[in-house]
Image (tube, rainbow, N blue to C red):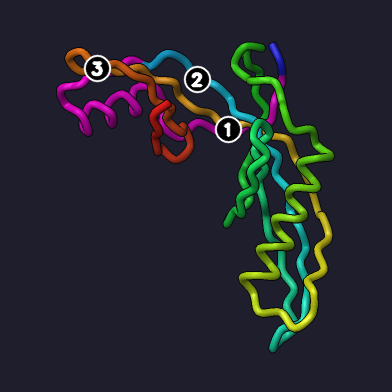
């Protein structure tokens, strides 16, 4: 057992199965397991001059396996949870590299999307390694079989 920071599961196993069955009535679905996917969360204080003086906070996540950055609207809420060792993949991106990716990503976003007169000043406020829960599902439809991953926080799903 290991202790991790995670987001809470919003869609439990039964709700996911029910939702999938409503979408594809003739398909047989089975939930295999829940996995916890690693991300780094970074929060930054951003300030710059535009037509008005700008000062605010922004957040960014970095995928700890692929290194992709994404802006976040709201700071995720984390809680501690004990889970089995096999429910989390090994990190590919270390914290130092993730911090570099996040800073470049936020700087690029702030520079290109906002119309600042000066270069934005970005100061890291906090960082956290966290895990987002996903349900692994299998499906069968006549001779077609496959796997899906269902985000246990948002309910969105993607084929694997």
Disc number lying in front (3 or 2):
3
Q: Which mark is residue 144?
A: 3
- Asked whether, in this view, residue 145 is left or right of residue 46, the answer is left
Quarter residue 98 falls in: top right
Residue 4 sits inside the magenta stretch = yes
Instruction: Determine whether label 3 and label 2 are within 8 Å by CB.
Output: no
Q: Is residue 72 above or below residue 94?
A: below
**Which residue lies at the image location 73% right of the left edge and 53% below the top edge?**
43
Residue bounds of the magenta highlight = 3-30
Q: Earlier in the sequence, mark 2 or mark 1?
A: 2
Q: From the viewer's side, name the closer residue of 112 and 38.
A: 112
Q: Position of residue 68 (x, y in %)?
A: 64, 43
Note whether residue 79 is visible: no
Note whether residue 117 is visible: yes
Quarter residue 1 falls in: top right
Q: How many marks?
A: 3
Q: Which mark is residue 34?
A: 2
Q: Position of residue 62 (x, y in %)?
A: 67, 42
* Mark 2: secondary structure: strand
Q: From the viewer's side, name the closer residue of 48 and 22.
A: 48
Q: Position of residue 25 (x, y in %)?
A: 16, 26
Residue 155 sits inside the magenta stretch = no
The residue that mark 1 highlights is: 132
* Mark 1: secondary structure: strand
Q: Is residue 114 above or below residue 122?
A: below
Q: Earlier in the sequence, mark 3 or mark 1?
A: 1
Q: Which mark is residue 5?
A: none
């Amino acid at each position: 057992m290991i202790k991790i920071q995670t987001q809470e599961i919003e869609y439990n196993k039964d709700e996911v199965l029910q939702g999938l069955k409503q979408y594809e009535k003739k398909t047989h679905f089975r939930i295999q397991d829940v996995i916890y996917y690693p991300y780094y969360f970074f929060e930054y204080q951003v300030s710059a001059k535009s037509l008005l003086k700008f000062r605010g906070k922004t957040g960014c996540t970095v995928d700890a396996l692929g290194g992709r950055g994404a802006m976040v609207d709201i700071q995720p809420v984390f809680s501690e949870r004990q889970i089995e060792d096999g429910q989390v993949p090994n990190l590919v991106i270390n914290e130092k590299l993730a911090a570099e990716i996040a800073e470049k990503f936020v700087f690029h976003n702030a520079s290109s999307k906002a119309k600042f007169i000066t270069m934005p000043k970005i100061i890291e406020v906090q960082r956290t390694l966290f895990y987002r829960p996903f349900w692994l599902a299998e499906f069968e439809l006549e001779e077609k079989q496959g796997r899906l991953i269902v985000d246990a926080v948002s309910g969105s799903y993607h084929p694997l």
